[in-house]
Amino acid sequence: MELTFDRLTKQFGARIAVDRVSATLTPGVTGLLGANGAGKTTLMRMTCDVLRPTSGQILLDGQDTGELGDEYRAMLGYLPQDFGAYPDFSVLDFMRYMATLKGFNSRDGRARSMRLLEEVGLADDARRKVKTLSGGMRQRLGIAQAMLNDPAILVLDEPTAGLDPKERVHFRNLIASFAQEKIVILSTHIVSDVEFIANRILVMRQGAFALDGSPEDVVAQAVGKVWECHVDARQAEEMALSSTVANVRYAADGHAVVRVVADEAPTAEATPVEPTLEDLYLYVFRDEAGR
């Protein structure tokens, strides 16, 4: 199975949100990484047929998804960035309602809903009202509803925004367990969400793909661009104001180790170090910090 973006473009008035992107996705987790406003959500909405492209195509095994229509949409599972559920529904009633919309009869819908609630750890909360759930539980409900039709293509737009670190780890493990034979597209600006589970990373910048490859290949683009400097605390505080500083570690003796992402050594004593995906992200988006 292959999902292909072929010179895909989306324009809103004079603004180009997605600019002639091309890529072919296969089963596994593809991490779509980019800053806010990079075009990720617009691309996801076109992928899910919520928005129609201005030009270009999305192809499933060579067939235009617009022409496939309902056949293509039946293969999709979608967790949007602004996922919402009826607050006064119970967890199970919401799942059964969504199952009905996806064509399940009452008995099968209930059985499928309970099975998925068990998988995402919400079976014991099936009778709770949605409005009483924590943020992490709501996101688990979101992934459960996206999986109701056992989709071949699972699209997750900023699925861990607002979750605490423990909830993010749980959610990443959950996604990985669903990704064995599916095309999973995980769109995020949180680097750790894709660092451990994606087997391919697309870095999106200003509506286009800036980098495309395995996590190792993408990170390799930052080799020779990451430095550590041993400086005094005053220098560290001055350097920390820069958008290219990845990390500052202060020591008890009044000195600090500053990790800097830059094309050239920031000080004469700076030494090059191995980059991480977070370093690469900072390097690519160094000119957009603070926007």
Image (cartoon, rainbow, N blue to C red):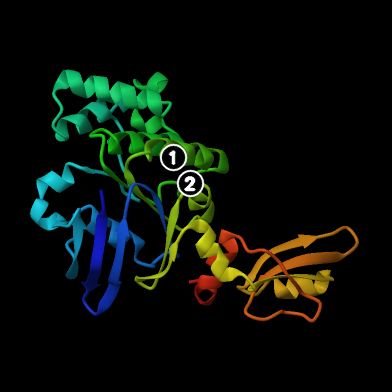
Q: Is residue 24 left or right of residue 171?
A: left
Question: Residue 74's quadrant in the figure?
Answer: top left
Q: Is residue 287 left or right of residue 64?
A: right
Farthest residue to the right: give it: 253
Q: Quadrant of residue 174?
A: top left
Q: Are marks 1 and 2 in contact (CB under 8 Å)?
A: yes
Q: Residue at x 51, y 63 (%)?
A: 217
* 260 lies left or right of 59: right
Residue 88 % position (x, y): 29, 30
Label disc, if present, on residue 91 of the rendered structure: none
Which amino acid does the dot numbered 1 rest on? Ala
> Closest to the observer: 137 or 153?
153
Disc 2 packing (10 Å; few <14; some 14–19; many ≥20): many
Please provide percent x and percent y for residue 257: 78, 65
Q: Residue at x 10, y 51 (%)?
A: 68
- 102 vs 41, left or right, is left
Q: Foreground residue, 164 or 174?
A: 174
Q: Is residue 147 above or below residue 263?
A: above
Query: Toward which corner of the image does residue 134 lie, by quadrant?
Result: top left
Asked if residue 278 shows in the view, the reply is yes
How packed mark 1 is, by other alpha carbons closer than 10 Å (few <14, some 14-19, many 20 or more), is some
Q: Which mark is residue 197?
A: 2
Q: Nearer the viewer, residue 109 or 65?
A: 65
* Mark 1, residue position: 176
Q: Earlier in the sequence, mark 1 or mark 2?
A: 1
Locate residue 270, reporting x and y percent: 77, 75
Q: Is residue 128 visible?
A: no
Question: Callout 2: helix, strand or loop?
Answer: loop
Element type at marker 1?
helix
Q: Distance from label 1 to label 2 (Cα)?
A: 6 Å
Q: Position of residue 256 (x, y in %)?
A: 81, 65
Q: Residue at x 54, y 70 (%)?
A: 221
